[in-house]
Image: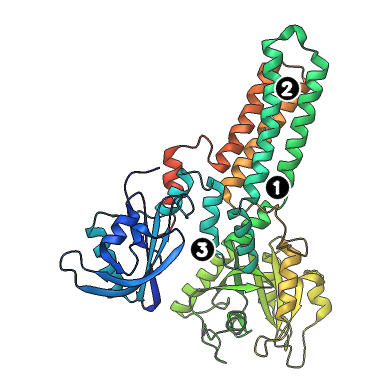
Amino acid sequence: MTEDTIAAIATPLGEGGIAVIRISGPRAVDIAESVFRSKVKLTKAESHTVHYGHVVSPATGERIEEALATVMRAPRSYTAEDVVEVSCHGGIVSVKKVLDAILDRGARLAEPGEFTKRAFLNGRIDLAQAEAVIDLIRSKSDRAFTIALKQAEGVLSRRVKALRHVLIETMAHIEVNIDYPEHDVEELTNAFIREKCEAALEEIETMLRTAEEGKLLREGIETAIVGKPNVGKSSLLNALAQDNRAIVTDIPGTTRDVIEEYVTVGGIPLKLLDTAGIRETSDVVERIGVERSRSAIASADLILFVVNGHEELSEEENALMDELAGRQTIVIVNKMDLEPKIDWNALYERVPEERVVRLSAREGEGLDRLGKAIGALFFSGSIESSDITYVSNVRHIHLLKQAKGALLEALDGVAAQMPIDMVQIDVRRAWEQLGEMIGDAVSDSLIDQIFSQFCLGK
């Protein structure tokens, strides 16, 4: 438990209905009591009770805000410390006045993520759960939120702890045989080690199988919308964003820079990049836009190549399709509300039919088919929001891969009949890598780095 008391604004700055100032630490209730006046003294209030009153100036006793104070006593709080949350009117001036009063009474302004860091250091949550809090806040789709929520509830942590238990059993068995070699039956010991390592390896591989999908759901798929001018790229962006995000005209070359927008299609988060139409041009500004379009194509995870279904494919479009061969590409045949004139057979010679989506961006028709096509391309056709095997955090994926490598080396050692104390080194390495996922034996610098990513007040 830490000895100082911290405070910070827990809600976004700006105007709103209410704002919340969170106080946590051994003096949280005393400090809140010194600036809050109500019928019930906060120092005598029961845990998890809410009290109406006024925040007063520590210097003059003058009322500065009408507020509610929520008391949560240790260990039944977010940080496992005494916590008081003061809810006041949501305005920049009112929130600043309340926070200043609390700081004047001895609280320290919290660092980014310090409340969650205290929850981790006080043992209420482990490191994997703490990192899931960031994912909850940054979730860009319902499925990403569901995955983060399950991890915050400890689903991933419980699987990792069960894996570590298997490995600690294995190491204990090895230790016994090292200490009492006269009782060792080498064949039985090797069989035991092999069985336990293979079981752990299978579980890790199961988690890694969906890791890339989980990462995409967490971070979003970087998606470039490309095509020649006036095929409906900006109309597609607006239809997916359900907003007039980009200018749409009949004049070719309207879009001259890359426009970014986050959208969700079929439950899949996409970071859309609406690019300038790719064509040869003498216009200096448009040429810069075309160069940026090609740069966006090079870095994108997914390319939505938009063509006009009301006309034949041009030589430029056929050439660009050839360039995109081998990339994750979906061809959008737009303007299907008009009479189609595209040569479907010629198109399917270049692109598999399942990667072609017919739609009308102007009418908003066919967008559901685009979601299904993206799901088929990246998620084997479907995403189960209830699937608890998703590992979405890059750090976790890296540690799982390292643990897998250590277990493979342990199995190689058993197969080569190496001394069991040598095999134990690899088993212990896997156990330690998994421990880093949940915060066992993790360095202070890594902890600081992780929690520095949090917003102030969380």
Residue type, label 2: Gly
282 or 308, which lies in front? 308
Query: Which residue position is annotated with label 1?
Result: 207
**Residue 233 coordinates in the image, percent (x, y):** 60, 80
Is residue 95 depicted above or below 152 in this figure? below
Query: Badge 1: few (under 14), some or many (20 or more) residues near its Cα, within 10 Å?
Result: some
Residue drawn at point x = 69 percent, y = 47 percent: 208
Location of mark 2 (residue): 413
**Location of residue 345 in the rendering, given as x and y in whole percent from the top left corner:** 84, 77
Few, some or many C-alpha atoms within 10 Å of disc 3 (few <14, some 14-19, many ≥20)? few
Name the residue: 36% across, 76% down.
Answer: 90
Mark 3–mark 2 Cα distance, whole angstroms, equals 44 Å
For mark 3, what is the residue? 137
Measuring from the top left, give residue 196's x and y in whole percent. 76, 30
Q: Quadrant of residue 180?
A: top right
Q: Residue at x 34, y 55 (%)?
A: 28
Q: Quadrant of the C terminus?
A: bottom left
Which is nearer the eye, 27 or 289? 27
Q: CA distance from mark 1 to mark 2?
A: 24 Å
> Which residue corresponds to the image point at 67% horizontal and 11% vertical from the top-left?
179
